[in-house]
Image (cartoon, rainbow, N blue to C red):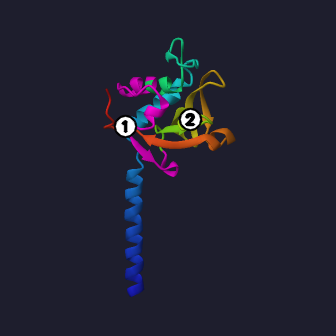
Amino acid sequence: MRIAIFTGLVVFVVFQFAGMAAAAETPSETNRLLAAEATDSLSSGIRYKYGGNNPAVGLDCSAFIAYLFKEAIGGRLPRTASQMSEMGDKVSPDRMQPGDLVFFRNARRAIAHVGIYIGDMKFVHASRKHGVVRESSLTTPYWKNHFNGVRRLSDTTPQS
């Protein structure tokens, strides 16, 4: 009898926790809109341009993210990837959701690049190497070795 009650209690707690975890993993409206905008941008023809901030001429990685945020949410983000890396909430890589910002380092800077995670270990970014907005995998050796964190912009992230 005690075993049956204990087993029932364990099953109840597990299902309750699983339900809370699933609810916590539901992407916010901000994330959903950012991921959709990022995916749609793959066919936009936007070119990469170092320091660029005009989609008609070209955007660098941070200007691209700021552009998507403005299009999706109507808000503004800081100009640089480093400044963006201080926005929102830090997220563990195993808790990433589509719409989260993913950051990368290089030999000179702790935060040198930013993209938007779209799920299945893929992200969308303005690629200097390829000269266009493109989808890349976080599992490729370059991105895996340069990965430097995830941030989630909540529905209440301040926008100026």
* Three-letter residue code for mark 1: Glu
Secondary element type, mark 1: helix
**Residue pointed to by mark 2:** 109
Judging depth in this view, the residue of 34 and 52 nearest the camera is 52
Q: Is residue 89 above or below residue 53?
A: below
Residue 83 pos. (x, y %) = 43, 32
Q: Give residue 140's quadrant in the image.
A: top right
Judging depth in this view, the residue of 53 and 125 nearest the camera is 53
Category of crowding for the residue at label 1, using alpha-carbon neighbours closer than 10 angstroms: few (below 14), some (14–19), many (at least 20): few
Q: Is residue 27 above or below residue 13?
A: above
Mark 2 and mark 1 residues within 8 Å of each other at the beta carbon:
no
Residue at figure coordinates x 42%, y 36% from the top left: 32
Task: Report the span colored magenta.
Answer: 67-96
Secondary element type, mark 2: loop
Judging depth in this view, the residue of 90 and 99 nearest the camera is 90
**Residue pointed to by mark 1:** 29
Residue 144 appearing in the image: yes
The answer for how far apart the CA atoms under marks 2 and 1 are is: 31 Å
Labels 2 and 1: the sequence-earlier one:
1
Residue 1 appearing in the image: no
Judging depth in this view, the residue of 77 and 26 nearest the camera is 77
Residue 67 pos. (x, y %) = 45, 23
The furthest residue to the top: 57
85 is within the stretch colored magenta: yes
Residue at figure coordinates x 36%, y 40% from the top left: 154
